[in-house]
Amino acid sequence: MLLQKKFYSYLRREYFLLGQCLSFLHKHAYSIMRKIIITIDGFSSCGKSTLAKQLATKLNYVFIDSGAMYRAVTLYFLRNHVDWTNKDQVEEALKLIDLKFEYNSEAGKSDIYLNEENVEYVIRDLVVAEKVSEVAAVKEVREYAVAAQQLMGKRKGIVMDGRDIGTAVFPDAELKLFMTADPLVRVERRYKELFEKNPLVQIDEVKHNIEMRDYIDSNREFSPLRQAADAIVIDNSFISPDEQLKMAMDLAKERIKMAQQVEQRQSS
Ligand code: DC
């Protein structure tokens, strides 16, 4: 009887350990496999960041919201009265800006820090949103942000969303997605998001801001918003977030497999 008990407890422990090993392998499977770069570009309020964050979590990759960098620079310029139409002022100000991302376990993603201050919340304000496209169109600002973004992707294993990630930042990325959605759906989504923070926000104001940002982002001189020739379009106007994630995950798995095969061929 005692022997039987001991045997069962031994089995339970072994099963527990096996379960732990399997869950570890499941969680880290994509970290062990060949890593790739995934870029997600598209218009404002298309849900790029949501998808990027979900993909990064599933793949155990780093998620970088490149728009947050342009927003943080805009916040600095506004606070310090930097005239972004003046090249010298911009260059001087950029020397004083330190941006970094730090993982926030509660949010399940990284927060952006501007000179050691967590500005993740304040950069989402309409005051910043109204000026960010103008600041993001400045050549020196783009050079500064793109150089930092390319450094972050050096070791691959990254999902980055923005406007020029598949065209200018990582033109050789293994998977490029381009997201789009019906303009009215986008306005409603953004309105709901802002309303939670500020119930006084007006839907017309949100609509105008989205239209203006689309226009400036698509028509600026330096790296305007474009769909990369090899990008895959996802229109999420009428599909559920789960369907969208499945679509993107299937593509990511396929591209990881392809990258792995290329690597094996090269090493044999
Ligand atoms: O993704 P977002 O709405 O947070 O981006 C804020 C602004 O920054 C947006 O107007 C376009 C600009 N942007 C850009 O020009 N290039 C990027 N890679 C990301 C954002």
Image (cartoon, rainbow, N blue to C red):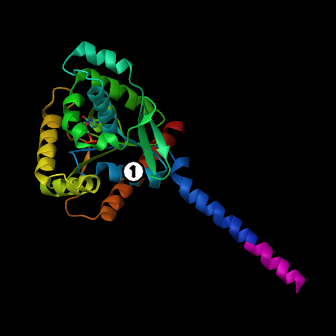
Q: Residue at x 61, y 62 (%)?
A: 22
Magenta span has 4?
yes
**Quarter for ligand 1?**
top left
In the image, is residue 245 above or below residue 175?
below
Q: Position of residue 96 (x, y in %)?
A: 39, 20
- Judged left or right of residue 2, residue 11 is left
In depth, the one of 31 and 161 nearer the eye is 161
Q: Residue at x 42, y 54 (%)?
A: 253
Assign the N terminus to one quadrant of the image: bottom right
Q: Is mark 1 within 8 Å of ligand 1?
A: no
Q: Position of residue 214 (x, y in %)?
A: 15, 41
Quadrant of res 249: bottom left
Farthest residue toward the top? 88
Q: Position of residue 33 (x, y in %)?
A: 52, 48
Q: Residue at x 64, y 66 (%)?
A: 19
In depth, the one of 93 and 26 nearer the eye is 93
In depth, the one of 228 and 104 nearer the eye is 104
- Judged left or right of residue 87, residue 30 is right
- Judged left or right of residue 35, residue 164 is left
Q: Which residue is mark 1?
A: 53
User: Which secondary structure is most common in the magenta stretch?
Assistant: helix
Farthest residue toward the right? 2
Farthest residue toward the bottom? 1
Quadrant of res 268: top right
Magenta-drawn segment:
1-12
Q: Residues within 10 Å of mark 1 (few under 14, many from 20)?
A: many
Q: Position of residue 117 (x, y in %)?
A: 43, 34
